[in-house]
Image (cartoon, rainbow, N blue to C red):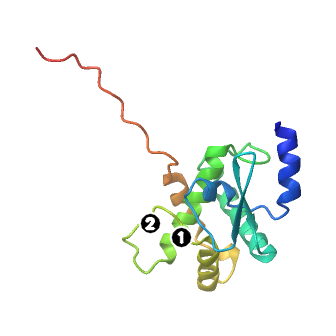
Amino acid sequence: MDEDQYRTTYNELNPNRCIFEKAITNRRCDCQLKRKFVIATRECVACQSEIAMARCTRVLDSMRNNARFSLKVVTVNGPMPHNKELQVQAGGMLALQNLMTSMPDLELKTVVNVHQTMETSLEKYGDIESLPYGELVKGIVKYQSRPKRKKKSKEKPKK
C-alpha cells in the first residue's frame, strides 16, 4: 500500500483521529476513550467521543504553543517534527498527571488515562487557560522518548 492510498484509507476509517495518537501508539499514554485498529500493519487510534476529542485538541494546542520556545521550534508553521510532537503529547500529559496525583513524589512513566487526567485537571483548574503551563512545559522539556545511550569509552585495555 503506497502512502497516498494509506492516508486516504486512514481518513475514511478514522474520522475522529485521537489527538494523542503518537503518545498512545508509543505506549506512553493510554485512554479509556481510545479505539485501536490496524491498517497495513500500522497501529491507528480513534477517539470515541467528539466532545473529549475537541477538548483534548484545545489542551494539546495550548501545550504546543506554550512549549514552542522551550523546544526551539518557534518558526515551525504546522505540525511539529515527530519526536517534538511526541515530547509535547507524552511529556505534557505526564506532567499534568503527576500534578493531579495525590503522591507527587511518585513520578509515573506512562499516563494511565488521558481522558480522566483531563477531567480531573479541568475540575481543579476550572478551564484550559488556567492550567499550569509553566509546570507542563518543564515536563515537556524534561521528557525523553528514548533514554540517551551512554558512549562507550575508547580506553585501551590495561596489560
Please identify the quarter of the rendering in which residue 154 is found: top left
Q: Position of residue 32 (x, y in %)?
A: 64, 74
Q: Nearer the viewer, residue 31 or 86?
A: 31
Residue 54 versus residue 27 in the image, above or below: below
What amino acid does circle 1 point to?
Answer: Val
Label 2 SS: loop
Can you say which quadrant of the picture contains the C terminus? top left
Please identify the quarter of the rendering in which residue 2 is found: top right
Residue 138 versus residue 150 in the image, above or below: below
Q: Which residue is mark 2?
A: 108
Given contact means CB atoms under 8 Å apart, are the residues at marks 2 and 1 in contact? yes
Identify the residue at horizontal 41%, vertical 74% (top origin): 104
Label 1 SS: loop
Residue 36 visible in image: yes
Residue 135 visible in image: no
Q: Position of residue 144 (x, y in %)?
A: 50, 49
Q: Which residue is mark 1?
A: 112
Along the horizontal axis of the image, is 37 left or right of 117? right
